[in-house]
């Protein structure tokens, strides 16, 4: 039975490779596009300008940023951003202000989607985590300091 499974897998892989080489499968059409300029920016303001075309965000109490006060391991810091109280959320971005590349992630929403994300980010040292919510063409933010006891991306 193991030999039969191996042969099926080999044939399937071979068929997929032939299809890719023949141009029948184009991986570039299924891969997500990313904002290289925003993710490679060294300063939070530059990242926001690259991602949203503006960097002035207004503090909002409608954004619930859930981050631990002390992260035991900076490599896997859990972050939750809840902007369900806001109408027309277009996107949510998370920045770690002192990371070498502060723009950590961005999530885009459309239609009736609720503005809520939960993820884990990498942090190299104690710093502020900033949630940026774009709603109605404007930027809103919530900020919280997270103390890192074991380094993630820096040590």
Image (cartoon, rainbow, N blue to C red):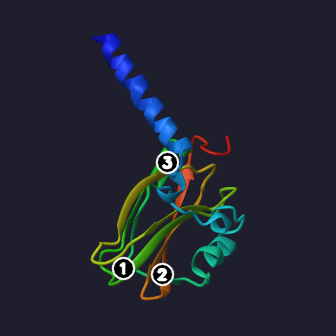
Q: Which residue is mark 3?
A: 71
Q: Residue at x 69, y 73 (%)?
A: 46
Of residue 6 and residue 108, the one placed in the foreground of this image is: 6
As drawn, is 136 to the left or to the right of 27?
Answer: left
Q: Position of residue 106 (x, y in %)?
A: 50, 65
As drawn, is 130 to the left or to the right of 44?
Answer: left
Q: Residue at x 35, y 74 (%)?
A: 83
Q: Which mark is residue 62?
A: 1
Q: Which residue is mark 2?
A: 140
Give me the C-alpha separation between circle 2 and circle 3. 25 Å
Q: Residue at x 55, y 83 (%)?
A: 57
SS category of the residue bearing label 2: strand
Where 101 falls versus 142 (above or below)? above
Asked if disc 1 and disc 3 are in contact, CB closer than 8 Å, the reply is no
Asked if disc 2 and disc 3 are in contact, CB closer than 8 Å, the reply is no
Give me the C-alpha separation between circle 1 and circle 3. 24 Å
Of residue 118 and residue 13, the one placed in the foreground of this image is: 13
Q: Residue at x 54, y 45 (%)?
A: 22
As drawn, is 84 to the left or to the right of 77?
Answer: left
Q: Position of residue 18 (x, y in %)?
A: 50, 37
State which quarter of the image contains the N terminus. top left
Within-10-Å neighbours for mark 1: few <14, some 14–19, many 20+: some
Q: Earlier in the sequence, mark 1 or mark 3?
A: 1
Asked if disc 1 and disc 2 are in contact, CB closer than 8 Å, the reply is yes
Q: Earlier in the sequence, mark 1 or mark 2?
A: 1
């Amino acid at each position: 039975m193991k030999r039969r499974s191996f042969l099926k897998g080999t044939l399937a892989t071979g068929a997929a490779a032939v299809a890719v080489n023949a141009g029948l499968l184009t991986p570039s059409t299924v891969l997500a596009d990313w904002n290289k300029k925003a993710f490679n920016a060294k300063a939070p303001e530059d990242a926001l300008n690259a991602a949203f075309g503006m960097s002035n965000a207004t503090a909002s109490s409608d954004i619930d940023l859930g981050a631990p006060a002390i992260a035991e391991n900076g490599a896997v810091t859990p972050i939750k951003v809840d902007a369900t109280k806001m109408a027309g959320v277009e996107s949510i971005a998370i920045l770690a202000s002192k990371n070498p590349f502060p723009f950590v992630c961005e999530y885009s929403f459309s239609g009736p989607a609720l503005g809520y994300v939960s993820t884990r980010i990498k942090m190299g040292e104690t710093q502020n985590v900033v949630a940026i919510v774009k709603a109605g063409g404007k930027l809103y933010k919530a900020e919280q300091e997270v103390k890192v006891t074991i380094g993630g991306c820096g040590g």
